[in-house]
Image (cartoon, rainbow, N blue to C red):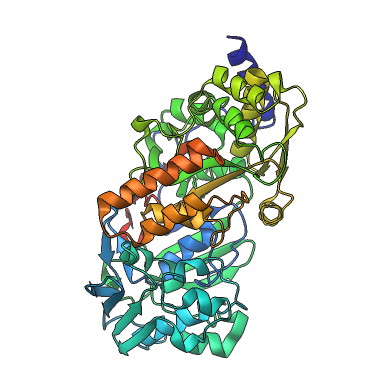
Amino acid sequence: MRLWTIFVALIFISLVGCEQAPDRPQENGADASQPAKSAGYLRIPFDGSISTIDPSLTVDIASIELVEHLFLGLTDFDPNTYEVLPELATSWAVSDDSLTYTFKLREDVKWTNGDSVTAHDIVWAVKRNLDPKLDSYYVFTLFSLKNAEAIYAGKEDISTLGVQALDDFTVEFQLARPTAYFPALVSIWTYRPLPSKAIEAHGDEWTLAKNIQTNGSYHLTSWKKGTSLTLEKNPNFYNAEQVNIKKIEYLIVPESSLGIAMYENNELDIIGQQYLRIPLSDIPRIKSNPYLSKELSVEPQFCTEFYGFNTQVAPTNNPLVRKAIAAAVNKQLLVDVVTKGNQTPATTFTRPPIFGAVDPEEKVGIQFDPIQAKKWLAEAGYPDAKGLPKIVLMHNSSEVHHANAVAIQTMLKHYINVDVEVQDQNFDDYLDTLDQPTTPNMFRFGWCADYPDANNWLYEVFHPTVSPNWIGWNNQEFAKVVEAAQSESDPKARLQLYRRAEEILNTEETAIVPLYFATALYLVKPWVNDWYIMAFGGQQIRNWSLAE
């Protein structure tokens, strides 16, 4: 009871200023018995500025969302099974040696200026994205192509790249190694065709509304940077007759508390997760409100919330210290008391049901065990944390992230007497800090799937040389295992390789502390029909509709 009381008290303190508003019906002049009506178009919030809509430079959630509406990928995913489906491609074939993929393209896809979208647009885009001067964040997703990594390093000429247009509507990719997940990988924005004429004519200003050419279900009509962005149905879209929502307005809303007020005042049609997180302090009120509770939905997200260790600085360069910290984090308590979103506590990184994820029932990873945590800390030379330097834990500014950090601070002090200093930074400074060797001992991060395969999680996040590797970790067995999994064509063998990678990362080395597999809370107005959430990537709003 003592920890529970202290824990709840500290979380309450961390949320001071986030007062619960009283229950109230929808406003906008409507009586509680007279529900409000749709504005006739979709209104969605983002919580920060939109950094880019250039597929080559896409990195944040807002940009991924917008690129999904504006530019077609070769493939997409079934919203129920996440099976890979054709989109710009109509079909594909793979050679017997699994090193060549050939995609046939739709011949009825147009740019918004009326020109046909061709295989040459894909080849041009891939070559552009490999230019080091562009500094594409997701350039590593192209390294599956023959010579791509060497070209990026300046060791090969771009003419040797493993991509070519066989004709206007056939594109061929030659791979550096067999890549079983390649049809899923080409859904990524780095493989999407780009309008070369517009980019060459307008340079950095090609994404302005007056210059941009797109080929997706929507086109850009207005972008007031820092305020709003508006998309309208693209009349040149090959399936335009099936797009029901004619206009989407994205509004920059800096605070969740403002967003929830706007939603209740009928100024937004949806709020939650990538569309501005619902304030933690409002969740109990929403669940008890007779109006809002009917509009609340809990959806799975292919994301894992975790803390990484800086493995290069003391004392978190010691695996025993890392194990002790991991074993002292009560993740179920964190979910029950702080996040309250029905998340699943995690001890591994790749989120089920993504291919290669480990079933939580297998108990891979460090389990909550304060007694064992104390033993590991003593074995590391710090009995009862005596002599242990202060642990610095950093997170990017957010109500949820701060509450989680305070909770972990409390647990580590209570269970193993470890002092933790919590620091927070705005997102841009935070990303800059992660790229420096002076990263604090522990830092908060969340990873969401770009495509449903463990390669996107293990190889692309923690490989010591070709990933961002924010934790500064260099385990050669891990590197060899995830490299082998890339080329392995037998699904059962790939699963075993990914299981071994998770054991090294989370059990033997404890290079991270997975907290939970994410869910997302949304409030959605009753007039938004056919609504569903993709667990990763941008949303398929082209399939939603609005009631009259």
Residue at 38%, 49% (x, y): give it.
Answer: 535
* Residue 209 in sight: no
Q: Position of residue 105 (x, y in %)?
A: 27, 79
Point out the image quarter for the N terminus. top right
- Looking at the image, is 31 positioned above or below residue 409? below
Residue at 32%, 48% (x, y): give it.
Answer: 495
* Residue 82 in sight: yes
Q: How many marks?
A: 0
Q: Residue furthest top?
A: 1
- Looking at the image, is 534 positioned above or below residue 134? above
> Is 209 on the left-hand or right-hand side of 341?
right
Q: Position of residue 330 (x, y in %)?
A: 53, 24
> Is 386 on the left-hand or right-hand side of 56?
right
- Looking at the image, is 139 positioned above or below residue 516? below
Q: Position of residue 109 (x, y in %)?
A: 31, 80
Point out the image quarter for the C terminus. bottom left
Residue at 34%, 30% (x, y): give it.
Answer: 361
> Is 232 on the left-hand or right-hand side of 434?
left
Toward the viewer: 388 or 253?
A: 388
Residue at 63%, 51% (x, y): give it.
Answer: 472
Toward the viewer: 298 or 251?
A: 298
Q: Position of residue 57 (x, y in %)?
A: 55, 70
